[in-house]
Each structure stands twice: as C-alpha cells, then as structure tokens.
Amino acid sequence: MATTLEQLRTPSRIDELEAMIGGPPRKPPEKPPLPGRLTSLDAYRGFIMLILAANGFGFSALAKHPRYGVIARQFDHVPWTGMVFWDLIQPAFMFMVGVAMPYAFHRRMEQGAKFRDVFRHVAWRSLMLVVLSQILMCVSANRLHFQLINVLSQIAFTYVLSFVIMQMRFRWQVVAAAGLLALHWALFALFPGSEGAFSKADNVGAILDRALGLKYSGYYVTINFISSTVTTLFGVWTGMLLIRNDAHAHRVKVLAGSAAVCFLGGAGLALVNPMVKRIWTASFTLFSGGWVLLMLLAFYWLVEIRGHRKLVFPLVVVGMNSIFIYSISIVLRRWLDNAVAVFTFRYRFIGDLAPVAQATTVVLVMWYLCYWLYQRRIFFKL
C-alpha cells in the first residue's frame, strides 16, 4: 500500500483513470507541479454550507403557502422515497470531501510525507470528526447522547474507506464501489422488515442500531456509510481528474458524461431499488451523484473557465471555513436568531416572506463572522 500511495507523487494513477474514461495518454513529467486550491470547489462548498447554515432560508415555514409552497418543499426532506434539493445537501458535502482528498494527499506527499504519515493523518482526522460530531449534537440537543448518523460521523467512516480504496488500481476501485452498493442492497434484501426489504421502522439498519443501543428519529441508520462511501469515491475520482493539467473541454466532457451515466443508472435502478435518502439506497447514491457532479460542473464553468472569481468570493469566504460555519449554525443558530430578532422584529411587517428575511439576516451575520476570520487568515480545519 505504501508503494501505491507513493504514486501520488506522479500522475500515473491519474493517467490510468484518464485511460479508463477515454482521455489521451501522456508521458508523465519528472516532477509534477504542486496543485493549488480549486477555487470552484471552495465556492461550491460555500454555496452548500450557506444553504445548510441558513436552514433553507426559512422556506420550511411556507410549505403550505399557495404561492411559495413549491419552493418551500425543496427545503425539506421527502418523507421516504423520491428526492428534492434538500436531499442533495449531504451528498454534496460528502462528494466535496472526496474531491479534496487527491489534492490534500498529493500536497502531503510532495512535502515529504510517507504512507504512514498520511495514514496517521487520515485516522486522526476521522476520529476528530466523530468527536466533533458528538459534541455538536449533544450541545444542540442539550443532553448527552451518542450517535453516528450526523454528517460528520458519516464522513469519518467514508473518509477512511475511500482512503483505503484509493490504494487500489482504478479498475479495482470501481469494483470496490460496486461491491459496496451490492453489499448494502444485499443486507436489506436478506434481512427484510415487516414491509419488505426497505421497511421504514424495522429494516436491517434500524435493527442493528437498536441492537447497539442507538435510537434515531427520522428513520436514519448508521450503515448508511456503506453506500455513501461511493458518493465520496465519486468525489475522489473527480479530484483525480481535475488535478491533471488537461484542457477544460476534456474535463467538462468527462464530468457531464459521468453525470449522465449516474442519472441513467440511478433512474434505472430505482425500478427495483427505491430511491431513499434516509437509508442511502444504491439508486439514491447514483442519482444524487449525477446532481452533485452537475453542481460542481456549474461552478467549474463559472470560475475556472469563465473566470468569475470575484462573483463567487462571498461563497469562497464560507467554503474556506466550512467547519466553522457548520459548527456555529448547530450551536448558535437559535441564539443568533433571537439576538437578530431584537432589531428586526422578525420582519413581521413585510408579510408572508418574513421567515425568509429573518433567516437570511441570521446567515448574513454568520457570513460576516467567516469574513472576519478570512481577513485574518484564520481557518478552522481538522
């Protein structure tokens, strides 16, 4: 494995990926340049984190509104099957973690890190993600309780698994991803609940959680990390593509083609494997993968191709401090909401859109905190 990770010093692994997806082979340089930050990824991350921190910009309060209800329903999870925009927030988060992994590991290897150093970093970061997840959820609930379904805990699992799978050749990475989806599906099919394989309350994931003494609301289950690892792997493969010095047209073609394959695969699989975000089914993994790829492609086109860096600067400010804004949105959102309401009177005087104006004001305060940190080059990382 050490030898395989060492290959991050050269583009050989990425050459193999490009060969698989139809790109022209090239002779690797003696020493590839150190990759810089991908501004479009920071902007994408900032976009997702702002929406998450704003809790859907208050639209959830307008779910039954005759005019704004259509928009409002995009900011609340579907009850079980199907998908709306809000169901894409966590997949986007996990996907972006994967995109950043090749960049981060390449830089560490270029700076002299050995395999054991990178592995130690991965293990430590995963542990800290679980710890931070517990702290935030306990503070938010105002009580002690252990859980493993929060996005940070789920990322901790997928981060380690994706790192291990990255050590394989690309073709075996694809086989491993397919195997994870098959394993997840098989667990539900072999141990069905009262309503079949994908029962809400007594599916195999819920039974395992109860056996471990874990009690969750909303029908979420811990074993979601098995299939969501594939979402992170989609990001890893995207990062391996973008880290190369290729033409924009080739990158766009690959990303758009990959999104189309995900959409077709997810829609086809949904005929026999229902699209359920709460248990992260295989069809949901693929279909949501298509959307998160398209969102990245949109930011890539806007920033890297069209060069509109100033336009996305407000998003970059948040994207470079995503852990910070996520934490304060969990711990301080209610306090900030009440503090802002002293001056805004919750915008009751503007009518139906008052919740939207209030939520927007609160998230602007959070943005300014990120900007204050950005000006002083203070970035919270794990």
Image (cartoon, rainbow, N blue to C red):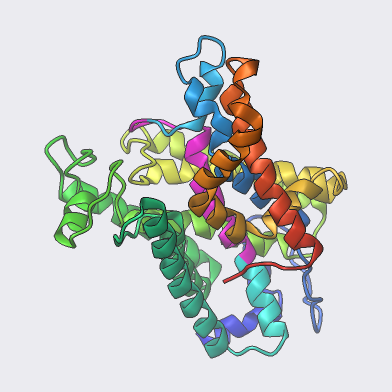
**Residue 330 in view here:** yes
Residue 374 in the image, given as x and y percentages of width and height: 76, 61
Residue 106 in the image, given as x and y percentages of width and height: 68, 76
Seen at 45% across and 39% down, the residue is 266
Furthest residue in direction front, as rendered: 342
Residue 24 in the image, given as x and y percentages of width and height: 75, 61
The magenta stretch spans residue 6:
no
**52 over 119 or under it: above or below:** above
**Residue 44 in view here:** no
Residue 39 in the image, given as x and y percentages of width and height: 77, 56
Q: In the image shown, does 278 or 5 lie closer to the viewer?
A: 278
Q: In the image shown, does 225 or 76 lie closer to the viewer?
A: 76
Q: In the image shown, does 275 or 104 lie closer to the viewer?
A: 104
Highlighted range, magenta: 79-100
Disc count in the image?
A: 0
Residue 58 in which image quadrant: top right
Furthest residue in direction left, as rendered: 194
47 left or right of 291 in image: right
Q: Main secondary structure of the magenta part?
A: helix
Seen at 65% across and 48% down, the residue is 366
Seen at 71% across and 74% down, the residue is 11
